[in-house]
Image (cartoon, helix red, strand yellow):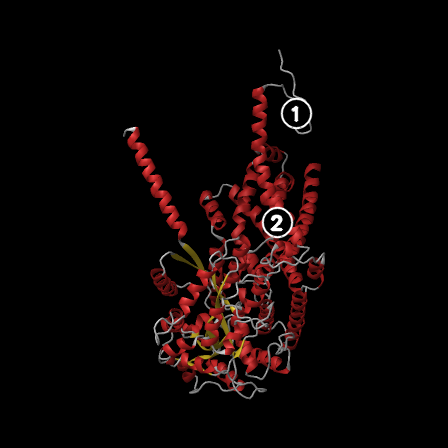
Amino acid sequence: MSIKRFVLVFLSLALILTFGATTLAQDTTLTMLTHWGTEDQLAAQQVIIDAYMESNPGVNIELVTVDFGELRTKIITGRTAGISADVYHFYHLWLPDFVNSGVLDQPPEDALAFINENVAQGTIDAVSTSDSQTWGYPTEVNPYLLVYNKRLLAEAGYDAPPGNWDELKEIAAAITQVDDTGAISQLGLGVMPGWDSGIVHPFSALLFSNGGNYLSADRTVAEFNSPQGIETLQLYADLVASGGTDPSINGLGNFPSGTVGMVIMAPWWRATLRAAEGVDFETEVRVAEIPVGPSGDTPSSIAYTWLFAVDSNSPNKEAAWDFIHWMNAEHSEGEGSAIGDFLVNALGAIPSFDHDQAAFAESMSDHYVSAFVAASAYARPEQIVAGGQEIKTLLQVEIEAVLAGMTTPEDALASVEGQANAILEEQRMMAEE
Amino acid sequence: MSSPAIKSSWWMPDIPKSAVLRRRMLWAYVFVAAPIIALLVFLAGPILFSGWVSLHRWDMLSPVGDMPWRGLQNYVFLLTRDTVFIKALGNTFLFAIGGVGANTILGLGFALLLNSKIRGRAVWRVLYFMPVITAPLALAVMFSFIFDRNYGVVNNVITALGLPRQPFLSGPNQALMTLIFIAIYQYVGYYIVIFLAGLQGIPQDYYDAAQVDGAGNWQEFRFITLPLLRPVMLFVVVTNTIGALQVFDLVFATTGGAPANSSMTVVLHMYNTAFKFSRMGRASAMAFILFAIIMLITILQVRLLRDRTYQD
């Protein structure tokens, strides 16, 4: 190759690379962090992302998913390392902490107007701080109900789910089967040790159905250490004593295999139950209201929410909010939003937006999700507060201690109450500083 | 003719003045400076920063400049009010005592066996060392199944022998002991190799001389093997103690500290405090308390074992 030709090729390549780099530099790249990481969920999210990128040339979306247990850590460490995502999908309990630390960008006015117009006030409150500032687009609403295996109840001689705690204890004990080596081959009520939501949400659902409260209405004081709370923890102790439950068996893992009679769970479990081999979703999986406790009048429950929000450090906030809006908006009347479709059909969760609830009403009318839809009307939203995650974990540990027979319900709740109130007080002082 | 010397200073020795040598010395200092700078940036810097953070309340999300000053409050809280920390400290000590004791005794015992003329010695060495090169998380998951209360193979064997089924990792009184067992399985192979190297470094002449003097096996072990293994023993005890006091991955992947913090360790509590509860100041204080404890124990161990080594 002559020198002249070499120089020509070199300059041409340099020109192409420079032009290419300039073109790439003009593209906007957004990173979205979610916890929806199963193969099916990834594929479904990618469909949404691809559709957005196709209709918005110049915007690239990169999806990052981590397990729920690592999501908060990922957000925190990403921010500290200066490599935070642009768009977060996170659990609303963390909202006050993130807001206090300046993690989140305030949604634009048109986004707030859209949310206010299309979401029920209770759900908006769940993604808002105490100053009524809304911080993102609410997504899944998850009330907790009693999910039971109709076949196992029938085999134990019961044709209806328990309506109160005496029935719950009776049926749970009747379903449990222990072989002559002491192995539990079938369990009445499954609990979910090691997972804070798996322990505290069912506890709260039972507590509310027993007429109790988690925090005071103004969220300044813990109220779970009450006669109703002690009765609720005593229920756990009684269930362990009668063999109705056993903390060594994980309800979440074993219900789908058909070896657990009842669990208290959320609607997003539908995809897992549909795919389960040990239990027939159509004929065996049923949902009932939370059994009413001795101090309660009517069934109640707890519901938690998630939201999409934008990182305040994002260099592409406008594009990020546009993407979130696109996912949540209905592009043709009556067809629902892309994320609504994902929530209902890929997860089995209840979407927040009215247009999604209307568009996917049929998909939510199956025997499983429809019960949760009905419960979402009366379930009490999880009270979010700065330090809420820490309080929840402390309570989880004490509930597990009661399940393990290490402490009494009275001592357990008294211990957490003191610590929870100290955290709430500390957070108040921090806010005043 | 010798070159005139460069004026000596505290940082540069007296050397002949020559352009080549000066350039060489300069490059020498450049090369030495690189790792020192890396050490300062990546080790000393974070340690000092962590110490500074331990005197503040910091959630890792707010700007560092906005950290509210807390003085020694984090330390006082941990030592007086944080019941989980006290519990975790106790568990960590138990874990270290059990793990170090068993690893030292078993490591030495198996090393003595493998140092003798037994059949398939090389195969045994490989077998003992395999857990060391296995990913800790993989081991943790494997043992979670093995020790499961209902379908674990250990319980199947126990019940086949007519003994009652045990909760192991799900039992508040057994979780920590089970973790110690797993840690011993995981690390004993490493200490066997260390002891084996020590044993093979003892000259055979000593044993020959002892045999001429009529010494038996026990006397050989007591008066030759053990004293000459003391430096190795010191290494095993110190490194094993430091590792055991910092245990994290095994507990994180098996019990997560459950049930009810019965298997909670200091580093796992530190991790939860930092990343789950966003209390980096308190977690940093925990790190410094653990550092002080490890340093104290290490100094004690070195003094106890080293002094006797030199006297002997």
Q: Chain of mark 2?
A: B
Residue B139: image x %, image y %? 48, 56
Looking at the rendered structure, whether the residues under marks 1 and 2 are on a common chain is answered as yes
Q: Chain of mark 1?
A: B
As rendered, which of A399 and B194 lies closer to the eye?
Answer: A399
Horizontally, residue A97 falls left or right of residue A84, namely right
Of the 4 image quadrants, the one containing the N terminus of chain A is: top left
Residue A166: image x %, image y %? 53, 86
Q: Secondary structure at mark 2?
A: helix
Of the 4 image quadrants, the one containing the C terminus of chain A is: bottom right
Residue appearing at x 62%, y 75% in the figure: A219
Label 2 neighbourhood size at 10 Å, few (<14), some (14-19), many (20+)?
A: some
Q: Secondary structure at mark 1?
A: loop
Q: Quadrant of residue A349?
A: bottom left
As rendered, which of A428 and A14 lies closer to the eye?
Answer: A14
Q: Is residue A350 above or below residue A166?
A: above
* 1 or 2: mark nearer the eye: 1
Residue appearing at x 41%, y 83% in the figure: A155
Type of the residue with mark 1: Pro
Residue B39: image x %, image y %? 59, 41
> Gap between marks 1 and 2, in whole Å?
38 Å
Q: Which residue is mark 1?
A: B13
Residue B63: image x %, image y %? 60, 56
As rendered, which of A237 and A379 lies closer to the eye?
Answer: A379
Residue appearing at x 65%, y 27% in the figure: B12
As rendered, which of A73 and A359 lies closer to the eye?
Answer: A359
| Res. B171 in view | no
Among all residues in the image, which is located at the extreme front?
A109
Q: Are marks 1 and 2 in contact (CB under 8 Å)?
A: no
Type of the residue with mark 2: Ile
Q: Is residue B31 above or below residue B163?
A: above
Q: Which residue is mark 2?
A: B242
